[in-house]
Image (spheres, rainbow, N blue to C red):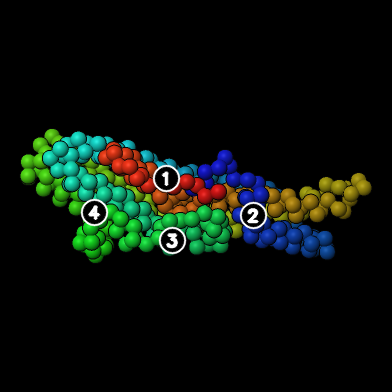
Amino acid sequence: MHAGKKFGAIEFIVWTRRSIYCLATLSAIPTLLYFLGWKFLSFPWQPIAIMGTAVAFIVGFKNNASYSRLWEARQIYGSIINDSRSFGYVLRDSLSERNPKKVKEMFLRHYAWLTALRFQLREPRAWENMNTAQFKEYAEKYDISEKLLNLDDELRNYLSDHELQYILSKKNRATQLMASQSKELSEAYRNGEINDFQWTQINQQLIKFTDYQGRAERIKNFPYPRNFSSITTYLLLLFIVVPFGLLKEFDKLGEGTVIEGLTLWFNIPFSLLVTWCFHTLDSVGESSVNPFEGSANDVPITQISRTIEIDMRDMLDEDNLPPPITAKK
C-alpha cells in the first residue's frame, strides 16, 4: 500500500500517460480538420455539457462504491487484528498451565491461517486490473510477497509435515485450518483442560474468524457489478466528443484581437484537461475497487498479518520475533 503523504503530480502524469497520449490525439484531430476547413465538425456545446453531468454522476457513483469496498476490507482486517490479540491471550491464559504445547500449536496454526487467507485473497480474478499495463507497470515499484513466495514454503514454517500435507490437499486451506483449530479446542475440552466458559469464549473467537474470512471472500469473489462498470466505460468513450463542442467557442475567442485565428488551438489543451480529469477519476476508482488484488491502494494484508504474528509471539515471551514488513522506498 502507498504509505507516503500523497501521490506526486509527476507520478499521476506518468501513471496516466497512455491515456494522455490517446486523449491528446483525439483532441488534435478535430482541431486540425476544423482548421483545414471542415467547419461542420463543430457541435453545439450544450448537449455535451448535459452528457458531462451524466458522466460525472456515474463516475462519482463508481468511486463511492469503490471506496466502500476498500473501507469494508480494511474494517475486516482491523477486526482480525483485534480478535487475534483477544484469541491469543484468552487461549494462553486458559490452557497454558495444563497444555502449553497445544497453546503453541494453536498459535502457529493461527499464523498459518493468516498466511493461507492472504494467499487466497491475492489469487487473480478475471475482472481485476493488475494485469493491465497501467497497473502492472506501477506494481514494479513494490513487492507483492504472495506473488514472489510459495504457499507451501510459508506454511511449512508453522505446520508439521503431516498437517501440511493434509491442508495442502484441501481446496480452501484457510477454512480447513480453522476447522483444525476447532478440532483441537474440542479435544482440549473433552480432556478437561478447559472448562465450559473457556471453551465458549475461545470457540466464539473461531466463529468470528470464519465470519471475517467469509466477508473478505465475498469482496474478493464478487466484483463491482459489470453493468455499472460497463456503462461508465461507454459514457467515458462517448465523452471524446468534448473537443468537437469547443471548436467554435475557441475559434471565436480571439476575434478582433492580435491572436485571431490562433485561439482555435487552445482547444487541444483544454479538451485534453477536461477528458483527462474524467478518465483519471475513473482510473482512481478502478485502483480501489478490488482491495485484495495487490495494488498500491489496497489493504496491506501482508503487513497486517505479520503485525498480528509479532504481537502473538510476544504474548508467549518469544525472543526471536520476526521483523515487521515495512514499505519499500
Residue 51 seen from this side: no
Mark 1–mark 4 contact, CB under 8 Å? no
Circle nearer the viewer, 3 or 2: 3
Give percent across and percent down for residue 273.
69, 50
Residue 264 visible in image = yes
**Amino acid at the residue labelled 4:** Leu
Please, is residue 263 above or below residue 97 in the view? below
User: Residue 148's mark?
Assistant: 3
The kind of secondary structure element at disc 2 is helix
Asked if disc 3 and disc 1 are in contact, CB closer than 8 Å, the reply is no
Residue linked to disc 4: 177
Label 3: which secondary element: helix
Q: Could you tell me the amino acid type at mark 3?
A: Leu
Mark 3 or mark 4: whose residue is earlier in sequence: 3
Q: Which mark is residue 14?
A: 2
Contact flag, marks 3 and 2 (Cβ < 8 Å): no
How far apart, in angstroms, are the residues tagged by discs 3 and 2? 26 Å
The residue lying furthest to the left in this view is 191
Residue closest to the eye, 224 or 76: 76
* Amino acid marked by disc 2: Val
Query: In x, y percent, where is residue 81?
Result: 34, 40
Measured from the top left, where is residue 40 in percent x and y? 76, 61
Tag 3: Cα neighbours inside 10 Å, few (<14), some, or many (≥20)?
few
Residue drawn where x is 42% and y is 52% of the image: 292
Q: Secondary structure at mark 4?
A: helix
Badge 1 is on which residue? 324
Q: Residues within 10 Å of mark 1 (few under 14, many from 20)?
A: some
The numbered mark, 3 or 1, whose residue comes first in the sequence reads: 3
